[in-house]
Amino acid sequence: MATTRVRKVGGIYNDAGFGKLVKQLNGRALLGVTLINSNCEECIKLHSFIKHLEHGFIDKLTQLVMVYGFSDAVLSSRAGDESKSEKDDTQPSEDSEEKPAKSARELGDSRLLSWSALPDGHGYALFLSENDILYYKGDFDHDEYVGNIIDNIRRFRSTIKTLAGLKGKRIFYQKKRTGIIIETGGTTSNSQIVELEKKVSAYEGRLQTPVFFCKGLAQEMTYVVQGEEIYKQKGLNFDKLVRKLPRQAT
């Protein structure tokens, strides 16, 4: 039987285009929106996972709804994308509903998906709630796609949050937010991450500071207050970090 939790869509969507579906989910599941680009060979990894979902794997991921579509947009050079992505990764503006359509061609082709939140026609977003959205776009790592989805499903009912890679970490600083950022590198095994999550969860109720996981280059933990680094520690010894925190953070 075909699942209703994996949907292929086409047409033009503005920044807030999937907000209605997120409201309907009402915290019961996270929403993934994936834009597969036909000009990107790496996107086969995204498409393969979605085909697995359609063939029954979605039944094992009860807290996931996936919407996907295709784009034939030509992928431009990534030079300068980093600064643009930092701007684009902010929350949708209130007047996003009024944004005009990109072109008459896109208006007339319902087979393709065009979404202003992913203007390059390439990438994905994870809606953890109406206001907590992780955008992966620009020069994103296709190999991390499945892992990012699984990690966020596992943390869905947890107080632990996720940052969208190093770009998300930079935006965290720019917005002058406060929290503990745990950065894991490519050599960090999934079992290490799961054990670390359990360690963080054991402090629930005692730790006043929110905890964010971030996939990056290093294995380190940083205590950030209003965008400023207060304490940084190499390695993943969370107990040691907590002992270094000021009293008001614990």
Image: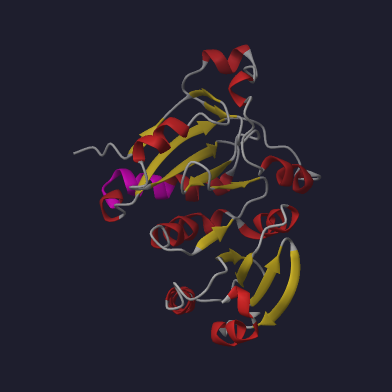
Q: Reply yes or no: does residue 229 show up in magenta.
A: no
Question: In the rendered image of this protein, does residue 115 appear above or below residue 199?
Answer: above
| Front-most of residues 87 and 51 | 87
How far across and how far down the image is residue 176, in percent? Answer: 72, 56
**Horizontal arrangement in the rendering, residue 232 relative to residue 249 (left or right):** right
How far across and how far down the image is residue 75, in percent? Answer: 68, 37
Question: In the rendered image of this protein, does residue 243 appear above or below residue 56?
Answer: below
Question: In the rendered image of this protein, does residue 211 appear above or below residue 135?
Answer: below
**Horizontal arrangement in the rendering, residue 150 relative to residue 248 (left or right):** left
Bounds of the magenta segment: 48-57
The residue under the point 62% across, 17% down is: 101
| Front-most of residues 40 and 96 | 96
How far across and how far down the image is residue 148, in percent? Answer: 49, 58
**Horizontal arrangement in the rendering, residue 36 relative to residue 233 (left or right):** left
The residue under the point 76% across, 48% down is: 82
Q: Quadrant of the N terminus?
A: top left
How far across and how far down the image is residue 220, in percent? Answer: 65, 77
Q: How many marks?
A: 0
Residue sitting at the far front: 248
Residue sitting at the far right: 80
